[in-house]
Image (spheres, rainbow, N blue to C red):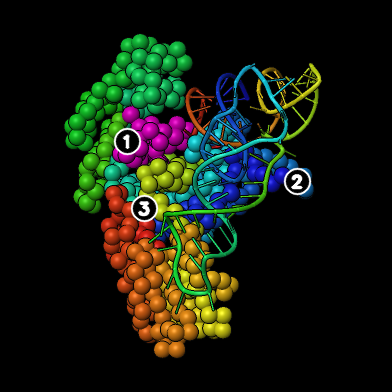
Amino acid sequence: MQPRTLKGFRDHLPEAMIPRERLIDTARRVYRSFGFSPIDTPALEYLDILTGGGGAESDKQLYRFEDQGGRQVGMRFDLTVPLARFVAQHAGQLVMPFKRYHIANVWRGENTQRGRYREFMQCDFDTVGTLSVAADIETGLVIHDLLLAIGFEGFTIRVNNRKILNGLLAKLGLEGNAAAVLRALDKLAKIGPEKVAAEMIEVAGASAEQAAQVLQLSEIGGDNEAVLAQLEPLVAGNEIGEEGLSRLRETVAAVAAAGVPSERFVVDPLIARGLDYYTGTVFETFLDALPDIGSVCSGGRYDNLAERYTKQQLPGIGASLGLDRLLAAMEELDMIERVGTPASVLIAYFDKTRLHDYLRLAAVLRAGGIAVEVFPEPKKLGQQLKYADKKGFRIALVAGEDELAGGRCQVKDLTSGERHEVSLDEVVGKVREVLAEGQRDGGTEGQRDRGTEGQRDWGTGGMRE
RNA sequence: GUGGCUGUAGCUCAGUUGGUUAGAGUGCUAGAUUGUGAUUCUAGGUGUCGGGGGUUCGAGUCCCCUCAGCCACCCCA
């Protein structure tokens, strides 16, 4: 029997899983810091819950089967549809506005490509049950904090409001073909204005004049103030469009007031995304160093999340971090430290009669919040150090008969090769000191979060809780 | 789902117009060294040539199918 995995499904080895878990931990911490609460929902749903919401294309990508009881079952392909079902089903028990985050795998039977798999993880956060622009603003701030906490500084959150596009299209008499027009517009960067105009004419049924008017959007430029000013005449006289613009203006002003530099939060009138259910503010986030990889965190506002399941009107806004895409980007930017262990310290099993001492020492370190492993076999010291090196431990503790007889222990810094002999009561302090040094100058330079609350997520090993 | 490229040791790859027993680097294991890794030296093993079928005296090499990966299209609710 050949061991193998399905197309688009992956195993995650420790070297990949350790940074993956750190990223998840970071997202979780940031979401919680804004008051979002965790939820979970089943991987499987009744098929009819999942189908019909997103059109034929998404239905095709749905993993579906009949269970042993004859039920038609589907695997969730995003976390938004399950959220809609969830809030409709539990509306009575939820306190509105409801803020939740949900980090879980989803499945899509689409063709694979680099960074695109059939099983992948989404990290969503949403605020349901309020129309207030404050929620739109907060969503932008969460995205900003999240990217910073992960370790990026050079990134751009592009923001727009779908109502501006809708207002413009209504003024042009194109509201009936909005989806097709926006789909074409979305390709602007990729295929250029001529081809976009051609697609609008052929596929969306626009006139050449209308297509040209829509493409005026691509000529808008300048800083946020200038862009907003140029949008003004395009929506003037259309109530929806004017509302979108004023909301966008409010959002931009508030995000700036909250301290986000304007180069990271940029109005882009061409961002349309989520053609099916987004109705207001929309976000996409690009990495300055790798714009081609696409948006790593996207989302927006929807007027009525759960209309398929309840009569109750449930507006919401949220966004989703593309975990796998982001990991691919971080890999490419050399932001990921390759280690095979989450522990920082290896205690050598050096003297075979001294296992109890080693276990006691390990317990002391763990009580001090330091992750530590005792090598399981009394092999030759050279081999144990080789193991420590390969797995990426930062420190080895070496204590043979000589040291232990004097109540001492050798703390070996595996990065520098330096050895320090200290008494057993000083070991925790010395280990902390060496780890701190590594964090100061051993980390990957470049795009690093200098830390909120003095805490670093991607530093080299060490002081994790 | 459609089209293109690729698949040889754990990894990166070489392998002549089809010709005997398929190679290199790296890694791995052990030793040199019963107390110090990442840099040295020595020895050692590994392959259903992605899988199946076909053409041929003979296939890693040519043909068909299939699986997987990468790229583009489509799509990304």
Chain hosting mark 3: A
User: Residue lying farthest top?
Assistant: A208
Kindly identify which residue carries mark 2.
A1
Q: Residue at x 36, y 23 (%)?
A: A188
- Rendering quarter of residue A298: top left
* Residue type for callout 1: Asn
Question: Are the residues flagged by discs 2 and 3 in contact, CB closer than 8 Å?
Answer: no
Helix, strand or loop under label 1: strand
Image quadrant occupied by the C terminus of chain A: bottom left
The circle drawn on residue A160 is: 1
Q: Residues within 10 Å of mark 3 (few under 14, many from 20)?
A: many
Chain hosting mark 2: A
The residues bearing labels 1 and 2 have C-alpha atoms spaced at a distance of 53 Å
Kindly identify which residue carries mark 3.
A150
Q: Which one is in front in this view, the residue at disc 2 or the one at disc 3?
A: 2
Nearest to N terminus: mark 2 or mark 3: 2
Residue A147 pos. (x, y %): 34, 49
